[in-house]
Image: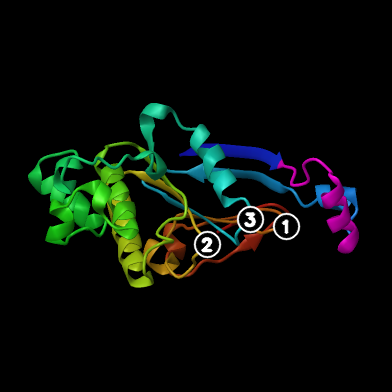
C-alpha cells in the first residue's frame, strides 16, 4: 500500500478587468468572494496495487486537477494516460496492440472493441467512441502499473460504459494494474466497483471512501472534517 497526498489550489479570479468588475457588481460579488471560489484539491489516498480509484463530482469541481496531481506522483516509466495514446494512420487496430495475437484480441475485447470491422480498421478512422476504446486497449496492453483516464467512458452510451467498467475492474484485479479514473457519471459505480471513491464538490472538503472486503456490497461511511473512510 502506498499513500499519495495532494494539496493544490487555483484562483478563478485572474485579472480584474473592467468587464470582470461589472459582472461582479451585477451579481453582488466582491473581489474577496470571487477569490474564495477557486478550485482546491487537498486529500490523502491510500492505494494498493490493482485498486480502482474513481474521482467523481460535478463539472468544475477539480476532478481533472486532482487526477493530474496524482499522476505527477507516479514515475513516468510506471504509467500511461489515455490522452497520450496516439492514433496511427497507417496501421490496422489489431496491429497497434502490444502482445501476441490472442492477447491483442483479449485487450480489444476488454476495451469493448470486438467488432471485426473495428479491429481491421485504421485507428485514425474510428469513430470518437471507438477511438476512446482503442486508447483504452492500448493502455491495457502497455504493461504499465498505473493507467490514468480523465472523463472515463463519458462519451460512450451508458450500456457500453457499464460493460467496460465491469471489464476494467476485473482486469485490474487479475493483472494488478491500478486505474485512476475521473468522471461525472455515477451510473457505472456498481459495475466499476471502485476500491477508492473520491468525491469532489464545488465547495467543501474532498471526501475519500474506501471499500474493504467486508463492506464490498454495502459501504458504511464514517465522516470526519476532510475525509471519509469505510
Q: CA distance from mark 3 to mark 2?
A: 10 Å
**Within 10 angstroms of label 1, few (less than 14), some, or many (20 or more) residues?**
few
Q: Residue at x 39, y 38 (%)?
A: 84
Q: Where does label 3 land, which residue?
A: 60
| Lateral position of residue 120 relative to residue 166, left or right | left
Q: Is residue 17 magenta?
A: yes
Could you say which is closer to the camera, residue 95 or residue 140?
95
Labels 3 and 2: the sequence-earlier one: 3
Could you say which is closer to the camera, residue 171 or residue 77?
77
Secondary structure beneath dot 1 equals: loop
| Lateral position of residue 25 relative to residue 221, left or right | right
Tags 3 and 2 in contact by the CB under 8 Å rule? no
Q: Where does label 1 land, which residue?
A: 203
Quarter holding residue 91: top left
Q: Residue at x 35, y 37 (%)?
A: 145
**Within 10 angstroms of label 3, few (less than 14), some, or many (20 or more) residues?**
few
Q: What span is in magenta?
A: 10-28
Q: Residue at x 17, y 60 (%)?
A: 114
Residue 31: x and y, percent? 88, 48
Q: CA distance from mark 2 to mark 1?
A: 16 Å
Model colouring: rainbow
Position of residue 38 relative to residue 143, above or below, is: below
Please indicate, yes or no, whether residue 173 appears anywhere in the rendered image: no
Amino acid at each position: 500500500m502506498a499513500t499519495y497526498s495532494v494539496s493544490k489550489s487555483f484562483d478563478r479570479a485572474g485579472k480584474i478587468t473592467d468587464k470582470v468588475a461589472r459582472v461582479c457588481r451585477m451579481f453582488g460579488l466582491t473581489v474577496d468572494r470571487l477569490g474564495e471560489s477557486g478550485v482546491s484539491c487537498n486529500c490523502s489516498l491510500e492505494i494498493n496495487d490493482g485498486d480502482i480509484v474513481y474521482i467523481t463530482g460535478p463539472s468544475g469541481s477539480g476532478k481533472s486537477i486532482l487526477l493530474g496531481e496524482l499522476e505527477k506522483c507516479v514515475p513516468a516509466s510506471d504509467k500511461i494516460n489515455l490522452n497520450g495514446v496516439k492514433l496511427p494512420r497507417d496501421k490496422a487496430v489489431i496491429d497497434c496492440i502490444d502482445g501476441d495475437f490472442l492477447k491483442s484480441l483479449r485487450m480489444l475485447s476488454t476495451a469493448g472493441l470486438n467488432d471485426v470491422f473495428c479491429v481491421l480498421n485504421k485507428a485514425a478512422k474510428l469513430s470518437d467512441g471507438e477511438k476512446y476504446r482503442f486508447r483504452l486497449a492500448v493502455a491495457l496492453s502497455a504493461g504499465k502499473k498505473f493507467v490514468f483516464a480523465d472523463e472515463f467512458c463519458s462519451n460512450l452510451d451508458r450500456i457500453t460504459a457499464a460493460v467496460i467498467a465491469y471489464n476494467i475492474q476485473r482486469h485490474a484485479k487479475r493483472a494488478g494494474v491500478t486505474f485512476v479514473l475521473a468522471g461525472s457519471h455515477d451510473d457505472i459505480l456498481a459495475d466499476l466497483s471502485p476500491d477508492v471513491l473520491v468525491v469532489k464538490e464545488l465547495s467543501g472538503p474532498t471526501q475519500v471512501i474506501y471499500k474493504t472486503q467486508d463492506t464490498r456490497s454495502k459501504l458504511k461511511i464514517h465522516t470526519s472534517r476532510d475525509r471519509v473512510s469505510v
